[in-house]
Amino acid sequence: MKTEENKDLILRLKTRHATVGIIGLGYVGLPLLQQAGQHLEVIGYDIDERRVAEIKRLSSSDSVISVSSDPQAIAQASVYIVCVPTDITEDKLPDLRHLKESARTISKLLEKGDVVIYESTVYPGCTEEECIPLLENGSGLQPHVDFVIGYAPERIVPGVEGLELATIPRVVSAGTEEGRRFVYDFYKLFINADIHIAPSIKVAEAAKIVENTQRDLNISLMNELSIIFDKLEIDTQEVLDAAATKWNFHPYKPGLVGGHCISVDPFYLLYKSRELGHEPKVIAAGREINDYLPLFVAEKLESTLLKNKVDINDARIVIFGMTFKENIDDIRNSKVVDLIMALKQKGASVTVKDNHVSNEVMQNIVGDQNENDDTLYDAAVIAVQHADIVTLGVDYFYNLLTEDKILFDLKRVVDIKDRERFQYWAL
Ligand SMILES: NC(=O)c1ccc[n+]([C@@H]2O[C@H](COP(=O)([O-])OP(=O)(O)OC[C@H]3O[C@@H](n4cnc5c(N)ncnc54)[C@H](O)[C@@H]3O)[C@@H](O)[C@H]2O)c1
């Protein structure tokens, strides 16, 4: 892409004489469609007909949103943005099925002068090694010459106010200098935040993975400390509060690490590292600790019940919150689900309360629940800090419990002054 062509396409986009096609309309693609759609002509494509119907139903009649499950709907697009899932397989290896399929779809629609930008999280090298060959073969066009390939990882945090798409600083890159300039100018059309241009696609891919790997590792250290301090019978938060008085101490908290990003992305880096012949130790250890945490909590609960002469087989346990974090409805890779499964496997009868999760999803995961209002539980676990769980208040939890008053407060929702009313345990 020459500078003139770049300016021309930006101008055509700005005046709505050129179209943007967004592929994959989930947690990333839909907000992007809504934000970019306020400034540009945008059409969304998702392979899932139900998802498309749901978006249509939820959008108001005067909305600018245009979505389809027919790839031909985005055939006229000049810029394609890919937001498809990049999960891991059961063996914890990158699952690139959606990425490859979408590349094949786009390759049939690509024309000279078009731009393809990837937002999906991948390992460094993935766009060039896996996506570009498919785009090239399917279109017969020459990458970096006939069409631009960009990479612009998404950092959106669903459910957190102040971290909306338009205000989050962004990293962008592309395969050529002109491409990088275009991608920068393009995002400037609809976001207000700073945009950092990384020198190559690989650097931008690595930056995204590193952000989430760092967070995974920092939390895993806290989780390991929490396991050790539990054996030492000292309170992790008290230790962290004391240590945090040092000027260069970084505050992190222990907790369940789930979701689609932090608990998944490090596996992409592990895969690439192993492929290159380096067996990663630190990153792998962090993942192992964080994945072990639900079992640790389940075992701790089992032993606490036993100390109170309650066999886990006879125990009724109520869990508050099932999503992977607070105030959202997303249960992907939720470690609360792992905790529920571990407790059920040990024979406990588990009741889960989460107003953010539909009855259908709840039934699929938890099965039939003990919904009797008069039930007293042998233990309660506050697993997610949803606003509507916090507002239940300490008396509510107290009155739900049998006389042992076993409360596992994984998010430290209960005030310090009220903790002595319970057999209180926290990470
Ligand atoms: N969820 C987040 O908070 C978040 C944040 C930053 C980055 N990411 C990354 O963004 C990417 C998308 O994540 P998400 O959370 O939006 O996923 P998602 O599962 O919510 O949505 C992806 C959508 O893509 C659709 N899709 C799958 N294959 C397709 C195809 N071939 N053609 C068209 N549509 C297809 C699916 O039907 C789905 O609706 C992932 O790589 C993820 O790691 C996610």
Image: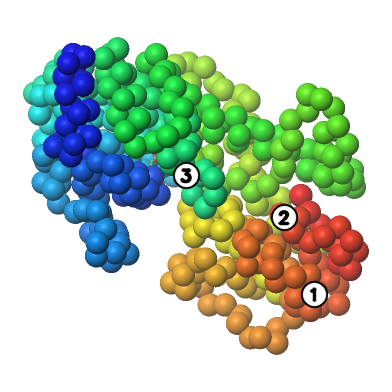
Front: mark 1 or 3: 3
Give the x, y percent position of residue 230: 84, 47
Residue 417 lies in what quarter of the image?
A: bottom right
Compared to residue 378, the image places residue 342 above or below, namely above
Q: Which structural element holds mark 1?
A: helix
- Return the mark for residue 164: 3
- Count all numbered tags in the image, as a single digit: 3
Q: Amino acid at mark 2?
A: Leu
Question: From the image, which quarter does the N terminus lie in?
Answer: top left
Q: Amino acid at mark 1?
A: Asp
Front: mark 2 or 3: 3
Residue located at (21% from left, 43% from top): 41
Mark 1 — residue? 395
- Return the mark for residue 410: 2
Q: Residues within 10 Å of mark 2 (few under 14, many from 20)?
A: some
> Of 388 and 4, which appears nearest the observer?
4
Residue located at (75% from left, 70% from top): 393
Give the x, y percent position of residue 405: 83, 71
Is residue 118 among the parts visible in the rendering?
no
> Of 216 and 341, which appears nearest the observer?
216
Give the x, y percent position of residue 422: 86, 67
Q: Earlier in the sequence, mark 2 or mark 1?
A: 1
Q: CA distance from mark 2 to mark 3?
A: 27 Å
Q: Which structural element holds mark 2?
A: loop
- Left or right: residue 407 compared with residue 343: right
